[in-house]
Image: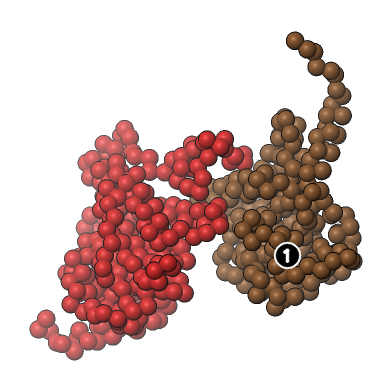
Chain colours: A brown, B red
Amino acid sequence: MTVPFYVAPEQVMKDRADYARKGIARGRSLIGTIYKGGILLAAENPSKSLHKISEIYDRIAFAGVGKYNEFDQLRVAGIRHADTKGFTYSRDDVDARSLANVYAQYLGQVFTHEMKPLEVEILVAELGSEEIPSQLFHILYDGTVMDEGHFTVLGGDSEAIAERFGAEFKPDWSLGTALKAAVRALAGPDKNLAARDLEVAVLSKNNGRRTFDRLGSPALEKLL
Amino acid sequence: MTLPVFDTREDPGPNFVSLLAKSGVPPFEPFTGAASELLAKGISVPHGTTIAALRYAEGIVMAGDRRATEGNFIAHRRIEKVFAADKYSAVGIAGAAGPAVEMVRLFQTQLEHYEKVEGVNLSLEGKANQLSQMIRSNLTMAMQGLVIVPLFAGWDLNRKIGRIFTYDVTGGRYEEVAYHSIGSGGKDARTTIKLGIKEGMSRSEAVALAISALYEAADEDSATGGPDLIRGIYPIVATVDRNGFSRLEDAEVAAASQAVITSKSSAGGAQ
């Protein structure tokens, strides 16, 4: 039997974090932002069927970047959590904060105890009401949760995109303006993104009980 | 609550009922011990009564009276027994009101759960079969006296027609051609529809016929509630067509009920 070499815990964690970050950096980025009357989620995604953005509950949406099978498993788990809670208590009792916490616990658990961390970054967005403001919970591969009040960027190139997007951001802007700014920020100075390269969804106050709505190519072209 | 993540072999997929079972809170748990003995003696619980559904040119209409009875008492005057199962289907319930409303809630959650997990809607037949499985799971409770028999109808997005499904207590599922009615006043409602139904009826004709079917049921069956002009309580009427489920405004149902009453009273006391 061979005796494993001693590796300092700091080194183990650093290696794992590097591994997860590398996996996430390979994928394309995503922006979530609050506009007047809703929340906009926009991602660069040429696939029409493998979604990065989905509905979790009446006022809650999910978005993920990184490894598809891993964030899709988290998406389904989120739907299960929300539907079970809504069925057991009531639809009003389902909230994004508690969902973000269980995601964070799970990701933290996997990061420290499993062979390999999940190569994902996820966003849980909740549309606010008259009393409660809209919220964006950005959760990292190691379970770190960040609560954002205006916008957040997920994915490999997030710092540069956030800088471009932050320069244009205005509180209470319209959907069209926010979408155009998001597309410009995602594309960067060197390329253009057309409607077919994008996956866009909103949580909108005009949509009745289920506020989630995926914007198809015709709607996107009109807005852009 | 922890995040419900399952081993691939244990994964319940898009099925909400088996998700609940795996999470340790299975629905349709039959009563045991003292509770089952009590039920065997026949304690009275509120029962929902009459639901009618029929097809018209562009879809289906479903209507339910507002009464729940407990033995020979009126338990509720304003109970609602017709629900949107999802955007393109409606479900009406007769039988033990408590477990029936719970089953509707489970059914609604199941349809939405499937849609969100899979990213597509179940077909209308898929929905009808899901309901069938839920009724079968309730068989032990049904034997204890808590019978639930729903009526299910909706718009088939693939075939572009409205369809109506009925059930028996074992979960047996039967498709009706043009109309059906369930509950204690079901037989009278059915006869009324049978005499009035025509191929290619308009929406307003179908709504009027459904309301008049419930009126006749209430006229013959003490457990079915008729239009209550004093309190302003009228049946719940909903339609499902290519644009989805829509519940009629109270004012429209009140006017249609008033029209049935007027035509009845013009016939005099002979009937």
Quadrant containing the N terminus of chain B is top right
Residue nearest the viewer, comparing A185 with B135: A185
Residue at 38% x, 81% y is: B252
Residue at 75% x, 10% y is: A1
Where is residue B231 shown, x and y percent of the image?
A: 35, 74
Q: Is residue B191 left or right of residue A27?
A: left
Q: Is residue B18 above or below residue A210?
A: above
Where is residue B200 shown, x and y percent of the image?
A: 30, 81
Residue at 21% x, 79% y is: B196
Q: Is residue A20 left or right of residue B229?
A: right
Q: Is residue B101 left or right of residue A146?
A: left
Q: What is the tally of numbered marks visible in this picture?
A: 1
Q: Is residue B198 left or right of residue B97?
A: left
Which residue was labeled with disc 1?
A197
Residue nearest the viewer, comparing A20 with A75: A20
Where is residue A66 shown, x and y percent of the image?
A: 74, 48
